[in-house]
Image: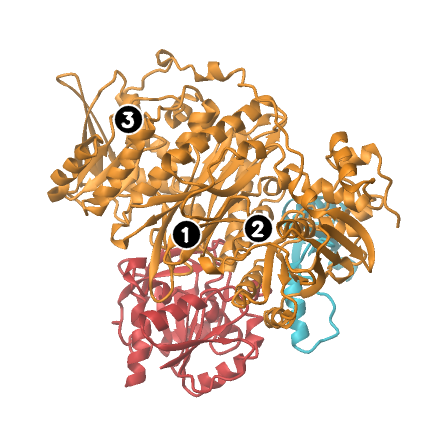
Chain colours: A red, B cyan, C orange
Amino acid sequence: MRWAVIQFPASNCDQDALHVLKEVLGQDADYVWHKETSLDGVDAVLLPGGFSYGDYLRCGAIARFSPIMPAVKVAAAAGKTVLGICNGFQILCESGLLPGVLVRNASLHFRCETLPVKVENATTRFTGEYKTGQVLRLPIAHGEGHYVADDATLDSLFANKQVLFTYCNADGKNTPESNPNGSQRHIAGICNRAGNVLGLMPHPERAAEKILGSDDGLGLFTSILRSQKA
Amino acid sequence: MIRAQVIVRPRKSIFDPQGDAVCRAIQHLGVASLKQAHVGKCIELELEGDDVEKARAQLDTICKDLLSNPVIEDYVLTLSTPAHGK
Amino acid sequence: MTDPAITPELVAKHGLTPEEFSRIKEILGRDPNFTELGIFSVMWSEHCSYKNSRLELRKFPTTGPSVVVKAGEENAGVIDIGDGWGIAFKMESHNHPSAVEPFQGAATGVGGILRDIFTMGARPVFLMNSLRFGDIRPNKPNAATNRRLLSGVVAGIAHYGNCIGVPTVGGEIYFDASYDGNPLVNVFCLGTLRIKDIRRGAATGVGNPVFYVGNRTGRDGLAGAAFASRDLTEASKEDRPAVQVGDPFIEKLLLEACLELFEHPEAVVGVQDMGAAGLTCSTCETASRGNSGIEIDLALVPQREPGMTPYETMLSESQERMLIIVRQGHEKTVLDIFEKWDIPCAEIGRVTDDGLMRVKNHGVTVAEIPAKKLADEAPLYKRDARRPADLDARQKLDLANVPEPAPLDLQLMLEKLMAAPDLASKRWVYRQYDHMVRVGTITAPGSDAAVVRVPTGDKSWKYLAASVDCNAHYVALEPRLGALIAVAECARNLAMTGAEPLALTDNLNFGNPHNPENFYQLQQAVDGLAEGCRAWNIPVTGGNVSLYNQSPAGAIDPTPTVGIVGIIRDPAHITPSHFQNEGDAIVLIGNLGDELGASLYLREVHSLKRGRPPELDIEREKKMHEAVRAAIRAGHVRSAHDLAEGGLLVSLAECATGGAKRLGAHVHLEKNSSRLDALLFGESQSRALLSVRPENLDALLALFKSHGVPAQRIGAVGGSKLIVDVKSGSNAHTTLNWDVSALYQAWNGALDSYLE
């Protein structure tokens, strides 16, 4: 699979994403600078974490106007895999590729820690290697991870099984205490209706090697690879 | 009832990185004539009663102590009573 | 607009003595003009020239086989770590700005140290910090202010470090009334680079263009400037920002653009960041290093404010700016890269051969100063030093006057101590730092030392360990010994993770150097640090001095913070700090100690800051580190945690509560001295707690014996309680026990309860 890791000004998890794709998974992966306009020949697009444009105004608000974004939208419409991690998720929401918006954590503090995240739907190209209900340990690191959408949207997301990940406790239960940022309905990651665009706040690329503490995030990437072969 | 609006802005000549980033973004979106942008906050308050001067005195303190950081921000406090029209 | 006349009052307002002014006249062969006066005043300020401390700093050992760039040569020292790779690291302070505006003061401190690292051509890979505040507990004086400062500083560090994508992986935070009003914010950064790619900051090659890149220049930092070039009215006060605002977004762009530019070595002759006194410092220093001259025209400098005077432009402390000396003919390479990253970039001058720093404004010369004399020949002072008059008295500790707590009191005391701000879990703080970005962090914050893997090309890694340490209470009570212990403790923390120390950076935080008692402390502390460095054979690669940390109430405790970086050759040897498994044997390394002098226990329980710090036998300490590393290499060690503040009992409690698995322990001790509290809380040095698989115990004990280091099994990991059974005499026993979960609640929830 050919991967493109988009670099926006002040993306800072781009190197981590490329490392996992190239060095851990042996994929053909390259950076694409935000000023480019083509994603021809690319099978999968990754929008990495970071603080694009300093998170000024609103997270992702300026990045969504980057010259590369029309090509990202075309790729999404064509059914290519589009994965937005953390700031990438924020950009996907600001650009309308995913519904809802990410706002300031309820605690008002940035939070960086590894916590339990539940796989809500294991039938998608992003989660095929997991089991529904499986509890993963994934790192989060964000100040604006609080997912918000109106009730109709939230109902629809759950009804259409577009909610792929929720925050939970070690036993897999969604509780107020296990929700690190106040996300509505404990949402940690959602996909679009067609199931090819995923945005999630946790960082699977930081949980892809055992030496770093957890490799529960590797399954997300291998799910994508497996679905491509299929 | 008294309505108060507080506009909090970066102080003149304090570096405003957010303003700079927004200015560049707007220029890139086609408004080449844009020279400067500054980003601040708007806080809207509603109080009971109609003693505007008392409210002003109280809110001035709140503006200095809480709503703005006088080291790097200025504020403009505007009060109105709907009964007196807008 | 005419410049003010140079009067003695104006000179004094610029912080220059009449003798210094005479020297300036000698150097110039005439009177300085207003702009030149400003330039000298910043270059010869304590902050830039270290004029009060340089003579002392010469005592530091700075050479060694692994030193590639020495302390003082460039912005940061560089150490060779093998296979053609090096590390550039340094620690710096931003104390006074953080007292004024904690968020931006701390944020810009992070920005500054990051630039010092990437200006060397190194990619910053991790940050640490050492912070000190006054007490934050509800009943303490100034607690509300101290909480505000702590929150602001932590948020500022988080804001800048997280945005730029460099993980903050460790540090220390301490609280003491001596820091009321004078918080300490010391920030450490380490970067990696190939030795062949080291960038230096020299301006060479006559005619080579000088480029300015980064944020535009404004009037930042000029509120502190001695005199305005126009009358200061209320209106113009507005124009003088009291604080610099950091922009981590543009610094990230600057970092990437610079590293990209450095891939074109043919284009870059020299590079220097613009830190304190930005344009002034960077131009004269690069010229001095290059034994050349430099000429710039301020009309070409990107400016944020209209109508800035040369004085203002040269003294401005606007952040996120670099000076690049480019090889003639390669200007386009530079312009293209900075245009790609959308960063202001302007050619502002050229390198000359006349040894002068010449500043023009619209073609008219406004300042002309011999660069070397300005940069390198600041006056040096030998300050008077006098042993503090009350030091002898403070060192006296008569334990007869310190009531021994009953066992039940001791029982209650541990929970209270674990909730003391100095000991409490710092999770409230480090949860705000992204400590995982760059997928290199191996040990989570809360460990004895941070362990980070750094890529060294071709899917290979090196494993670095780092810690920052200083027990300022020890230094206050015996400066030389306290500083020596800072080095020993830092090296000890590294040994606990399996690392060998490589080199050291220091941040000396002291009060007003014109006070002989303060200067005595500085002098003695430097002696202690130097002795420690020689003992561990580690060079000082650079550091920072922050003086005048003083309020009407007095000076801060002398705080010589040290940061040591070490290396772990094999990732299999990376060792955690806390208990790992039920059934593991607990081994005490070193002797049962009983030294209560200068201890946390005396401070927290008896409100006493007295006594001599514990003894340190350097050879014994060194042997202990070697033996622990040998045991780790032999595969015998499951966890290792040193004994420090709070002594044995606190260290045990930390092992039980600090890990991912909270595990109890049952421990048997034999009282060696008359006091139970001395046994449990004494801070005798050179000690550690290891946990060991039972089947490895004999081999481990034999190994320590062969190294001549005391080691004894004192108990086992297991259960949900921490049980300490103390035998005194032939038959008497005292048994103390705590629920590990209760200890954990007290320890984990303390900062939250003070701050939320």
Classify mark 1: residues with Cα within 10 Å, few (<14), some (14-19) or many (20+). Answer: many
Please, is residue A215 above or below residue C489 in the view?
Answer: below
Q: Chain of mark 2?
A: C
The image quarter containing residue C85 is bottom left
Tell me whether marks 2 and 1 sit on the same chain: yes
User: In terms of depth relative to the viewer, which is nearer, C74 or C432?
Assistant: C74
Residue at the spot 58% in from the left edge and 76% down from the top edge? A65
Q: Secondary structure at mark 1?
A: strand
Q: Chain of mark 1?
A: C
Residue that label 1 marks: C80
Residue at the spot 81% in from the left edge and 44% down from the top edge? C34
Residue at the spot 52% in from the left edge and 16% down from the top edge? C390
Quadrant assignment for the C terminus of chain A: bottom left
Residue that label 3 marks: C680
Real-space Cα separation, disc 3 to disc 1, in angstroms = 42 Å
Q: Secondary structure at mark 2?
A: helix
Label annotation for residue C533: none
Classify mark 2: residues with Cα within 10 Å, few (<14), some (14-19) or many (20+). Answer: many
Q: Earlier in the sequence, mark 2 or mark 1?
A: 1
Q: Is residue A164 visible?
A: no
Real-space Cα separation, disc 3 to disc 2, in angstroms = 43 Å
Q: How many marks?
A: 3
Tell me whether marks 3 and 1 sit on the same chain: yes
User: In terms of depth relative to the viewer, which is nearer, C85 or B78?
Assistant: C85
**Front of the two marks 3 and 1:** 1
**Front of the two marks 2 and 1:** 1
Where residue C146 sits: x, y (%)? 54, 37
Label annotation for residue C112: 2
On screen, residue A130 versus residue A146, left or right, reads: left
Q: Chain of mark 3?
A: C
Q: Check disc 2 and give the amino acid type.
A: Gly
